[in-house]
Structures are given as structure tokens and as C-alpha cells.
Image (cartoon, helix red, strand yellow):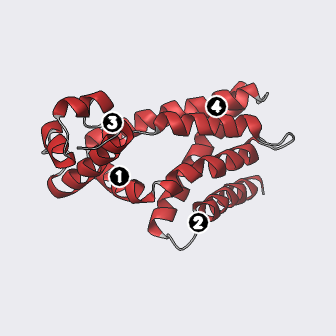
Amino acid sequence: MPRSGAEARRRLQRAALELYGERGFDRTTTAEIAARAGVTERTFFRHFPDKREVLFDGEADLRAALMRAVAEAPDGLRPLDVLLHAFQKAGRILEDNRPFAEPRLEIIARTPALRERDLAKSASLTEAVAEALRRRGVADRLAGLAARTGWAAFHQAAEAWIDDPSQALDAHLSQAFDDLRALSAIAAG
């Protein structure tokens, strides 16, 4: 049996990833996840409200890191530069959890119910980022647009990082935001 709550949580996440990979999300039960992790099903539900949330654990940490990084970004930056700064800081959470992030994205991509949950979580995080920009004085309309655009760039960078681990996530983020600027320059030209 795991000795701590954090260890039980990690074991449950690993077990869920393994089982979802082997059997698929829909054909895996919480009881099977708990058994593979060496804990009871009751322990599973102490840590996660349902089997989907095993894959979305850490959302609160990411939200807090993004909000803090937006608030602490240097003064005078344009909204997209604030977001690049924030995503680079918060991206360390993904980098620290790469062994979990990679199979997680694959499982979500092939499971419609998880894609739906991922979209809902992304929308919630995007709204939190927009709110953090508003607190910095960015106009409401621009804050929402910047947050959605920045989130899309972050998502693209994360996918590129999974596909090409030879570069750090920061490099992929810089490239994605450079691409946004290039698109903007083409549209303005």
C-alpha cells in the first residue's frame, strides 16, 4: 500500500494511464484502476471524483501558476508578451510531468468524452487567463481575444514539444508566439 496520499495519487494516475492505454478509457473501471494501483476503490474516490479527472489533475496548479505569472509579468509588456511570459513559467509544470503528459494527450485525442472535458477545462483556464489580463488593465474585449489566442499558441507549442522533445517547451512556446506575430504582420501588410 502507498504510504502517503501523494504517492497513492501518483499510483492511481499511472495505473489509469496504463489501463486506458491497454483497454481504452470506456472499458476501464475505477475498481480496475484502484486494483492496479494497489489501493481500494474508496481510496480512488478520495482522490478523484470520477475516472476522467485522473487525467485532468493539476488544473488548479496550472491555473494558479498562470494567474500568478500574468500578475508578476514585467510592466510595459503587450498582452501577448505577458502571455508568453506566463506560459513559459507555467509550462514548467508540464515539463516536470512529461511522462504523464505524453500518454495523457494521446488518450484524450482518441476518446470523445475526454476531448469534451478537455475543451471545457481549456475554456475555464482561458477565462482565468483573460481575467488575469483584465486585472493588469487590458480591455475586456482584448483580454478575451489575447487569452484565447495565447491558449491556442500554448496548446500548439505543447503538441510540438511532445512531437519534438529535442527542444525545451520554452523554445516551442517562443516559436508559436513568433508565428502569431508573423501572422499578425502578414495580415497587417
Given contact means CB atoms under 8 Å apart, are the residues at marks 1 and 2 in contact? no
- Viewer-side label of 4, 2: 2
Mark before the other along the chain sequence, 3 or 4? 3
Please tell me whether mark 4 or mark 1 is closer to you in this view: 1
Residue 110 in the figure: left or right of residue 100: left
Total marks placed: 4
Q: What mark, if any, has residue 168 been given in the picture?
A: 2
Give 81 or 6, whichever is nearer the viewer: 6
Work out whether 121 lies above or below 172: above
Q: Name the amino acid, label 4.
A: Ala
Mark 3 or 4, which is nearer the eye?
A: 3
Secondary structure, mark 1, is helix
| Separation of residues labelled 3 and 2 (CA atoms) | 27 Å
Image quarter of the N terminus = top left
Q: CA distance from mark 4 to mark 1?
A: 26 Å
On screen, residue 183 above or below 50: below
Position in image of residue 157 (x %, y %) = 55, 58
- List the residue tagged with mark 3: 53
Q: Quadrant of the C terminus?
A: bottom right
Q: Earlier in the sequence, mark 3 or mark 2?
A: 3
Residue 105 image point, x, y percent = 37, 53
Q: Is residue 126 left or right of residue 97?
A: right
Q: Secondary structure at mark 2?
A: loop
Q: Amino acid at mark 1?
A: Arg
Q: Earlier in the sequence, mark 4 or mark 1?
A: 1
* Residue behind mark 4: 130
On the image, the x and y values in percent for residue 87 come to 63, 48
Q: Residues within 10 Å of mark 2 (few under 14, many from 20)?
A: some
The amino acid on which the numbered mark 2 sits, given as a three-letter code, is: Ala
